Structures are given as structure tokens and as C-alpha cells.
Image: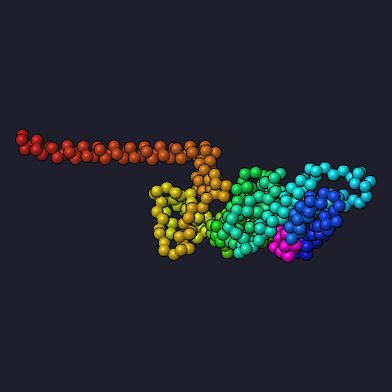
Amino acid sequence: MADLVKQILAKPIQLADQVAKAADEASSFKQDCAELKSKTEKLAALLRQAARASSDLYERPTRRIIDDTEQVLEKALSLVLKCRANGLMKRVFTIIPAAAFRKMAAQLENSIGDVSWLLRVSASADDRDDEYLGLPPIAANEPILCLIWEQIAILFTGSLDDRSDAAASLVSLARDNDRYGKLIIEEGGVGPLLKLVKEGRLEGQENAAKAIGLLGRDPESVEHMIHAGVCSVFAKILKEGPMKVQAVVAWAISELAENSPKCQDLFAQHNIIRLLVSHLAFETVQEHSKYTIVSKATSIHALVMASNNSNANYNIIKVNDEDDKQSYNPIQHPMGNQNLPQLHNVVTKTMSSRSTTNPALNQRQGSGANQTNHANTNSNNHQNIVKQNQHHHQQNPSLSGLA
């Protein structure tokens, strides 16, 4: 990467030196050429600084910015060489509009701003200031692209907290627009997101997993993620990651599998299907599970059930352990506006559908219930007759005594 960036920067540095030398040899428009030389030397200093920091530069914006800078320097060199024309005839036939120098000075200033932004955005977390980086002049035509560059650059070089915030920003962009998701993939955002899933803190891992799930909206995007190593990363999280992160990863896997059925075989090869099934089978839903007391969430299913059972009638035991406290935080659906399926609802619906589709069973159950009610009625009538007879016998002795 560092050698590649140095190769990219070699030509514009050479062009900047040529512009400065040609400006010294100008025989006309000397003041304008001196101004162009000043800006070119400033730009050359920034390019050399970028070459020294080539190992830290984010490749995608580096290519785009350096290509534009190279074109500007070629135009500046062509303009300055015209001012070096000797002889009266050359000066007469060489026409240089006065606006050409103003336009070239503005373009050089824009290149200086672009390279300065590239150096700031590619700086490490320790060297970067907390001030807002802003957008470079190159962002005038496509500001979203530069915003994506900034967030991906933070994923490469920022602290864990900054990387978590950057992943959350990418989640917001990917959710809003499919095109933004494509840009995130094209600009190299998948690799640092997967790295954050493996190495980040809890919140950062969740944000990165959400971003991966949102980016896999078509087979081409999913294939790109598979080549980047998403299967091995997700398998590792499902084996030993925090439960909340495992829940988000499970959702992301479902999104990738839905949008690209071909990846299901690869998930199976990495034992992801087995790990998901083991999580589902870890706990059994009892008939009255919604009335039971949850002592500790120890699986994905327990966390999902705990997040859905939010009524006041549910009793949750408080724990002092810090890890246990985190397990009781409700898990929101990654898309934020969807309800997670509940297994006991599925069971209820299945039983009701079976009863409606089997009328003979319903008829037998109904006749059995009628026979039971008839028997209960006869038993109650018999008890009433016995009580009346007993009451009649109790009254007969008193009547005989009176006689």
C-alpha cells in the first residue's frame, strides 16, 4: 500500500517542481507566474508530506484527489511555459487571457485544500484534532462521497469509540439510500467494518454488524462481503461473542442469506447454520413462558424474549454482577421498526390452524363436551331429589306427634 501511494504521488511532485522552475524563467506575466509558483510550492510541500505518510493514507480518496491534482498541475505547467516565449513573433502569436491566471490560481488553491483534507482525515487518532474536518473542495459535486470517505478513514485509524460512531454513521447512510450502501462497499468500507466486529467494544460491534446486514442488499454486495471474510468473522462471534452482538449477527446473516441464496452453502461450510440452530435449541419455550421469572439471559432466544416481554406484569430479578446487568438491556431490532417473532405465538397459531382444518376432530370434541354437560346435569338433578326426600322425612315425625 505504501509503495503504491508513493508511485501515485511521484508524478505530481515532479510536475510541481517543473511549474516552479518554469515560473522563474517567465519573460511575460511575471507577477502572475510568481503567484502560481507560490501556490505550487505550497502544494508540492503537502504532496511530499503525503509521500512520507503514505502508509497511513486511505487509498480510495488518495487516488481521486491525486489524479485531479495531477491534471491541475499539467494545466499550470502549460500556462507558465507560454509565458516563457522568447522573441517578438512568439509573444504576438501567444495569446494568454488575463482570466486564465485567476482560474489557475483557484484550481491550485482547491488542490491544496484537497491534499490538506486528505492528510487530516488519514491521520491517526493521536494526531487528529477534535475539530470538525469539513468537506474538501472536491466534495462540491458529490458531498456524500466525501462524508463516506471520512467515516471509512476513521474506521481505519480512529480510536474504538470513534470507530463505533463512524460505523453508526454508515448504518444511517446505508439505511437511507441503496446508492450510499453501494458507495460504502466500493470505497472499501467492508474490511474495516468486519475488523470492528472482531475487535471493537460491545456498541461498536453491534453498529458494525448492523452496517454489514444493511449493506448486503443484492447478490453482488453479498459476494463482495464473502470475499472480505464475513463468514469466518460471523462464525467467531456466534461461538464466543457477547449475546447482544450475536443477536445482531444472526439478523445480519438472515439478511445476507435472503438477498443471496447462494451464500447459504458457504454459511453451512463455516458451521454458521449449526451455531444458529444450537442457539435456538439452547432453551425450550414452556407453555406459560410469558408468566415465568427470567433469572438470567443465557442465549439469543432468552434475550429476544426478554426484549419483547416489556409489560409491567413481568418480574425480572435484579443482579449485582455487571455482565448480568448488560444481559437485561432490551435488544432493539436492527431496523428499528420491526417486531421480532415470538415462538409461543407460532405454536398458538399452528394449533389454531390445525383445529380449523380438521372439522371431524372439532365435531368429536363438541359431542364429547355435550355428553359431559348432560351427565353433569343429570347428576345435579339426582342430588336435588335426594335432598328433597330427606327434608320430607324430617317433617313426618313432627306431624305424627301432633296427631
Question: Which residue is more in the foreground, 304 or 187?
Answer: 187
Looking at the image, which residue is at 66% across and 61% down?
123
Looking at the image, which residue is at 43% across and 59% down?
295
Q: Main secondary structure of the magenta part?
A: helix
Residue 81 relative to residue 381: left or right: right
* Residue 160 within the magenta-colored segment of the rendering: no
Residue 254: percent from the left, percent from the top?
Answer: 62, 51
Residue 282: percent from the left, percent from the top?
Answer: 53, 59
Residue 333 relative to residue 272: left or right: left
| Quarter of the figure with the N terminus | bottom right
Residue 373 relative to residue 34: left or right: left
Residue 27: percent from the left, percent from the top?
Answer: 86, 52
Looking at the image, which residue is at 91% across and 51% down?
86
Residue 89: percent from the left, percent from the top?
Answer: 94, 46
Question: Which residue is more in the foreground, 130 or 210?
Answer: 130
**Residue segment shown in magenta:** 46-58
* Furthest residue in direction top, as rendered: 403
